[in-house]
Amino acid sequence: MTVIATASPHNHAFCTSLGAHSVHDYRSPSIIPDLISAVQSTNGTFAGLYDAISTSSDSYPSTVPVVEGLGGGVLAVVLTQPENPPASVQAARVFGISEKTEGLWREFITPALEEGVVKCVPEAWVVGKGLESVQKGLEENKKGVSARKVVVELE
């Protein structure tokens, strides 16, 4: 299993420590051909692309062309699917399992978690407890959170 990641440069070491084979700056003007080349150089089977941002303004301009450039496949998204993706791009939400993401979970994510290749990170940063702390959590997210998981514990 080979994971190729994108991140801002200050998180490259973090991604590598988690097992990423290579990490690329998502702001690079050559990010699309860089990712296609990185995937092709692995000599493995392309399982799919996981888009943790999933917006038409921030990530789809890069993620959709990468999947298309690799001949098509699954684009796993966390928010709404891209509008009118090319026929070769099979977009599906990963909030649960669908017929399009089932293989990604069964063949990659579940075994990778079991083998310790993929880790449940980052550690939780608990900003408070109860519904009264939700606003604080939202404010922390608005300030900008990188490689941190903001959590409000509900009692």
Image: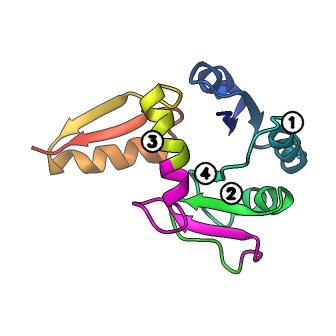
The residue closer to the viewer here, 153 or 86, is 86
**For marks 4 and 2 on the same chain, the one whose residue lies earlier in the sequence:** 4
Tell me the crowding category of disc 2: few under 14, some 14 to 19, or many 20 or more residues within 10 angstroms, Cα based.
some
Q: Which mark is residue 109?
A: none
Q: Which residue is mark 2?
A: 59
Q: Residue at x 34, y 30 (%)?
A: 125
**For marks 4 and 3 on the same chain, the one whose residue lies earlier in the sequence:** 4
Between circles 4 and 1, the one closer to the viewer is: 1
**Membership of 103 in magenta stretch:** yes
Q: Which mark is residue 110?
A: 3
The residue closer to the viewer here, 53 or 114, is 114
Q: Which residue is mark 1?
A: 41
**Membership of 18 in magenta stretch:** no
**For marks 4 and 1 on the same chain, the one whose residue lies earlier in the sequence:** 1
Tell me the crowding category of disc 4: few under 14, some 14 to 19, or many 20 or more residues within 10 angstroms, Cα based.
some
Residue 133, x across and y down, in percent: 22, 44
Q: Which residue is mark 4?
A: 50
Distance in Å between CA atoms under marks 1 and 2: 23 Å
Tell me the crowding category of disc 1: few under 14, some 14 to 19, or many 20 or more residues within 10 angstroms, Cα based.
few
Residue 74, x across and y down, in percent: 65, 61
Residue 24 occupies quadrant: top right
Distance in Å between CA atoms under marks 3 and 1: 24 Å
In the image, the segment drawn in magenta is 85-106
| Mark 1: amino acid | Ser
Image quadrant where one finds the C terminus: top left
